[in-house]
Amino acid sequence: MLQTPESFSLGYNYPNPFNAETVIPFQVKSPCRVIFKVYDLRGREVLRVLDGEYAAGSYRVRLNNSVLTSSVYFYKIRMIEFSAVRKMVVLE
């Protein structure tokens, strides 16, 4: 039986740094719109990963470096009253 998460959360990507693919876990406490974006060091949006309605549950985002060059990036998630930002490093 799957358990509903007790809170909204954004995990850290693994592996970090990465050169091929990384996985980022997040949890949705109750049904809501999830917006997940990646930003460069200057704060410019470089990738909109998710923008849609999600049911309560645990999820994972997979990112690969086919669209990201070697650099430091920040990923941000927004869900109802929850927002979080984490840092990741892409190496080629």
Image: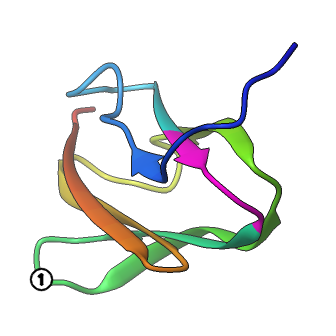
Q: Which quarter of the figure is the C terminus placed in?
A: top left
Residue that appears at 50% across and 71% down:
47
Question: Where is 75 relative to 20, above or below?
Answer: below
Q: Residue farthest to the front?
A: 6
Foreground of the two, 10 or 70: 10
Tell me if 27 is positioned left or right of 56 in this view. Answer: left
At a point 81% along the width and 20% down the height, the residue shown is 2
Q: Does the stretch in magenta take in 28?
A: yes
Above or below, comparing residue 48 to residue 43 in the picture = above
User: Which residue does the numbered mark 1 point to in the structure image?
Assistant: 42
Which residues make up the magenta segment?
26-31
- The image quarter containing residue 91 is top left
Residue 46 location, x and y as percent? Answer: 41, 75
Tell me if residue 11 comes above or below residue 80 in the rendering.
above
Residue at 30% over, 26% down: 18
The number of numbered badges drawn on the structure is: 1
Q: Residue at x 44, y 79 (%)?
A: 81
Q: In the image, is 40 to the left or to the right of 65?
A: left
**Observer-nearest residue: 35 or 58?**
58
Position of the N terminus by quadrant: top right
Helix, strand or loop for disc 1: loop
Residue closest to the eye, 18 or 36: 36
What is the three-letter code of the residue carrying label 1?
Answer: Arg
